[in-house]
């Protein structure tokens, strides 16, 4: 099943090395782990607001970098210029038109990396899924060629421009200096991409990456710090002019998110599957363009995957090209944390892959976009379709996709329709989206009874019928 492939890839022992945190005594909780993460200190807003005293990655068993995929991955890192939309200094980015690069050294390194990745268990699982489920009949040669195009073929990440100096590999794994030649603000994010723990560790070791603190949303902060397989952080990146082709000043990444301990074939696998799934209409399942909710270990993540935009948005969605623009994990925490799954204070919520609306109490209609101000006038109607049961609504609640809840009172009799006016009396109050991807959830206690979604822009005063 498409909805399970990302979790299956994560569960492969070959997808990542072991990672642990430092314990309260300052020593690794698992002394045998290959990577030790020290995600100490809450981030501020600027480079000089850091609350971390020590590096993010305390220890790495660098013998893992001798593995074929790590070794060939690291060999590619010095082929790229740090500045966004500028030609590379280490090689000619030009493609000869036959799938090879003008610089034979770079082409050889790309092919060596692809050879290693395609032989790995995660990519073999991904390839099988693509060729059986997402693109039946695709040959191995065609898939390899497409992977090379997705990750390594240059394109412009600003539609309407002709400077093809971006690749998915460069943006996702290496990072791009998005500043101008003048000294940038210490409080403005000037780093594009940069979602690789390996690249971060190597930059940290070289004195080019400085950890400023973790930067999870408040309601999932504890879950994020407790999970050693992810880091959502604020950090300072200082690529040099000579070695990296950068402007030569320090840049703020605000925030940066990446998996920790993953082998590069895991990211290549989920990104490649995601690109094929987007084309097949089988990627999004949380009501947001180019995002998919998955459960890795004990926590939920939104996989954010954007292909290149080849034109201006139409109905909120830009036309998509064949190249991957970015891929990164947005940490969402445990099911039910921060009000999700039936809480009600705002935060994450477990959204289903498909809407369902077949419980005895159903979501019948809603008005997401009332005439005039949205501060008042939003409402949802419930209908009791049971044959013989009235329900006390004090144990029920409505909820939006961000986990903000609308409590209810009274009861709903057999055959009765009840209109629930949304109070909108605070920042954590339930509110309905005025654009596609709006979810309405109905919980009885902590059990989700119904979940409906509208995928159009609601007009002012429009009533959406879910029956």
Image: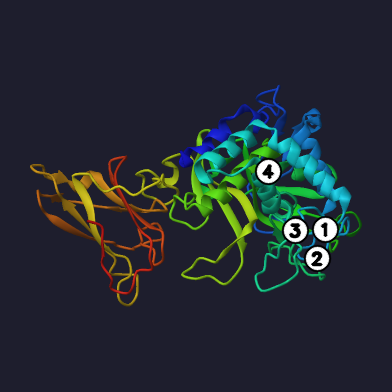
Q: Is residue 41 visible?
A: no
Q: Quadrant of residue 322?
A: bottom right
Q: Dot 2 lies on which element? A: loop
Tags 2 and 4 touching, CB below 8 Å: no
Residue 50 percent location from the top left of the image: 70, 51
Left/right placement of residue 374 relative to residue 408 reads right
Left/right placement of residue 397 relative to residue 97 reads left
What residue lies at 70% left-to-right and 65% top-to-bottom? 156
Tags 2 and 1 touching, CB below 8 Å: yes
Which residue in the protein does label 4 denote? 141
Give the answer, above or below, for where 374 lies relative to 451.
below
Which residue in the protein does label 3 denote? 176
Q: Nearer the viewer, mark 1 or mark 4?
A: 4
Q: Quadrant of the C terminus?
A: bottom left
The CA distance from mark 3 to mark 4 is: 31 Å
As drawn, the residue found furthest toward the bottom would be 372
């Amino acid at each position: 099943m498409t909805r399970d492939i990302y979790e299956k890839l994560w569960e492969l022992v070959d997808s990542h090395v072991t990672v642990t945190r430092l314990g309260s005594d300052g020593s690794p909780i698992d002394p045998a782990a290959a990577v030790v993460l020290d995600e100490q200190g809450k981030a501020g807003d600027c480079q000089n607001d850091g609350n971390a005293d020590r590096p993010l990655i305390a220890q790495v068993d660098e013998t893992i970098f001798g593995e074929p995929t790590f070794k060939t991955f690291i060999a590619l890192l010095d082929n790229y210029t740090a500045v966004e939309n500028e030609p590379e200094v280490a090689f000619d980015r030009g493609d000869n038109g036959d799938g090879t690069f003008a610089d034979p050294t770079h082409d050889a390194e790309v092919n060596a990396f692809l050879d290693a990745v395609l032989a790995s268990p995660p990519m073999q699982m991904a390839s099988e899924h693509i060729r059986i489920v997402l693109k039946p009949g695709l040959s191995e040669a065609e898939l390899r060629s497409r992977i090379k195009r997705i990750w390594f073929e240059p394109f412009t990440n600003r539609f309407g421009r002709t400077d093809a100096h971006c690749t998915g590999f460069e943006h996702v794994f290496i990072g791009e200096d998005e500043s101008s030649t003048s000294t940038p603000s210490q409080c403005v994010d000037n780093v594009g991409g940069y979602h690789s723990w390996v690249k971060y560790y190597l930059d940290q070791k070289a004195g080019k990456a400085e950890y400023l603190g973790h930067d999870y949303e408040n309601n999932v902060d504890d879950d994020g710090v407790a999970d050693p397989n992810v880091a959502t952080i604020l950090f300072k990146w200082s690529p040099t002019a000579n070695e990296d082709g950068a402007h030569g000043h320090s840049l703020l990444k605000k925030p940066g998110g990446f998996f920790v301990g993953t082998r590069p074939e895991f990211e290549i696998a989920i990104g490649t599957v995601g690109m094929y799934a987007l084309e097949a209409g089988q990627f999004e399942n949380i009501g947001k363009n180019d995002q998919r909710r998955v459960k890795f270990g004990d926590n939920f993540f939104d996989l954010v995957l954007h292909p290149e935009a080849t034109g201006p948005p139409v109905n909120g969605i830009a036309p998509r090209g064949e190249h991957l623009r970015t891929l990164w994990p947005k940490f969402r925490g445990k099911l039910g944390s921060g009000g999700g799954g039936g809480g009600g204070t705002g935060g994450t919520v477990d959204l289903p892959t498909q809407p369902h609306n077949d419980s005895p109490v159903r979501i019948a209609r809603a008005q997401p976009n009332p005439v005039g101000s949205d501060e008042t006038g939003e409402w949802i109607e419930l209908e009791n379709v049971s044959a013989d049961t009235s329900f006390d609504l004090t144990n029920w609640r409505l909820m939006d996709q961000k986990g903000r809840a609308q409590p209810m009172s009274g009861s709903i009799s057999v055959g009765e329709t009840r209109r629930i006016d949304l109070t909108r009396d605070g920042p954590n109050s339930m509110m309905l989206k005025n654009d596609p991807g709006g979810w309405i959830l109905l919980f009885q206690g902590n059990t989700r009874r119904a979940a409906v979604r509208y995928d159009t822009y609601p007009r002012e005063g429009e009533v959406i019928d879910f029956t």
